[in-house]
Image (tube, rainbow, N blue to C red):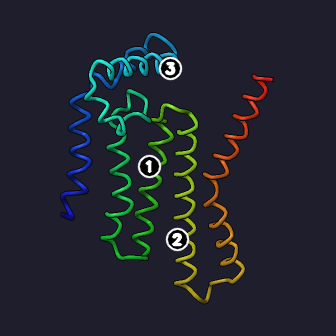
Amino acid sequence: MTVIYPLGIPSMYLYLLRKSKALLTGGQREREKEVKKEQALKEALIEREKNEEKNPSMKSLEFLYSAYQPKFWWFEVFETSRKLALTGFLSFLSPGSFSQILVSLMMSMFYLFVYTALRPFSDEFDNDLAIVSQWQLVVTLCSALAIKASKDNPETANLADSHLFDVFLTASQFMPVLLSLFYNYLRARRKRGEGG
C-alpha cells in the first residue's frame, strides 16, 4: 500500500487525462501562435467547454483540470506528485535532520521555479497566490534551517535571534492570507468604481 498510492494515484490521473488530452487542450498552443495569449486562453476555455458538452464523460474528470489553463491539462498530476513528495517522501529521511530540511528546501525551490515559469492556472490571481504560497514554504524552510543550526550550536545561539526567527516565521505564515484579502479588497473597489 505504501507504493500503490504514491505511484498509482498520479499514474491513474495521468492515464485518464491523457485519454482526453485532445479534448482538454482546446488548441491553446496553436492559437497562441496566431493571437495574444489572453485571447488564446479565452478561446481554448470556450473550446474545452464545448467539448465537455459533447462528451459528458469529461465532466467526471473536471476536478483534475478545471483550475488550469487547457495547455496545462496535466498539471494536477504534477501537483499531486508535489504534495506526495513534500510529505510522504520526506518521511523516509531522518526526521528533523539537516538533510530532511535541506532536501525539502531544494524541492520547494524547484516547485517555486515551475510555478513561476509556467503560471499554469487559468486565473491570474490563482497563479499569484500559488507563487506567494511557494515563497512562503521556502521562507519557512530557510527559517527552519536557521533554527536547526542555532539549536545544534548552543554556544553560538542568541536568544534575540531566536525570537526574531519566531516572529519572522509566524509573520510569513500569513503572506498568502494577506495577499488574498488585499486582492479581494482591490476587486471590490474596482467593482464599486465600475458600478457607481
Residue 173: x and y, percent?
60, 61
Q: CA distance from mark 1 to mark 2?
A: 18 Å
Q: Is residue 61 visible?
A: yes
Q: The residue tagged with tag 1: helix, strand or loop? A: helix
In this view, 23 is above or below 34: below
Give me the residue at 44% from left, 66% from top: 102
Amino acid type at circle 3 is Lys
Q: CA distance from mark 3 to mark 1?
A: 23 Å
Q: Are marks 1 and 2 in contact (CB under 8 Å)?
A: no
Labels in figure, total: 3
Give me the residue at 64% from left, 54% from top: 175
The first of marks 2 and 3 along the sequence is 3
Give me the residue at 26% from left, 34% from top: 17
Q: Nearer the viewer, mark 2 or mark 3?
A: 3
Q: Residue furthest bottom?
A: 155
Front-most of residues 88 and 157: 88
Residue 195: x and y, percent?
76, 23
Residue 139: x and y, percent?
57, 60
Residue that carries the numbered disc 3 in the rendered image: 37
Residue 145 badge: 2
Q: Is 165 on the left-hand or right-hand side of 44?
A: right
Q: Quadrant of the N terminus?
A: bottom left
Q: CA distance from mark 2 to mark 3?
A: 40 Å
Residue that carries the numbered disc 1 in the rendered image: 111
Give me the residue at 34% from left, 49% from top: 80
Amino acid type at circle 2 is Leu
Other-residue count near label 3 (Cα within 10 Å), few / some / many at <14 / 14–19 / ≥20: some
Other-residue count near label 1 (Cα within 10 Å), few / some / many at <14 / 14–19 / ≥20: some
In this view, 109 is above or below 125: below
Other-residue count near label 2 (Cα within 10 Å), few / some / many at <14 / 14–19 / ≥20: many
Amino acid type at circle 1 is Tyr
The first of marks 1 and 2 along the sequence is 1
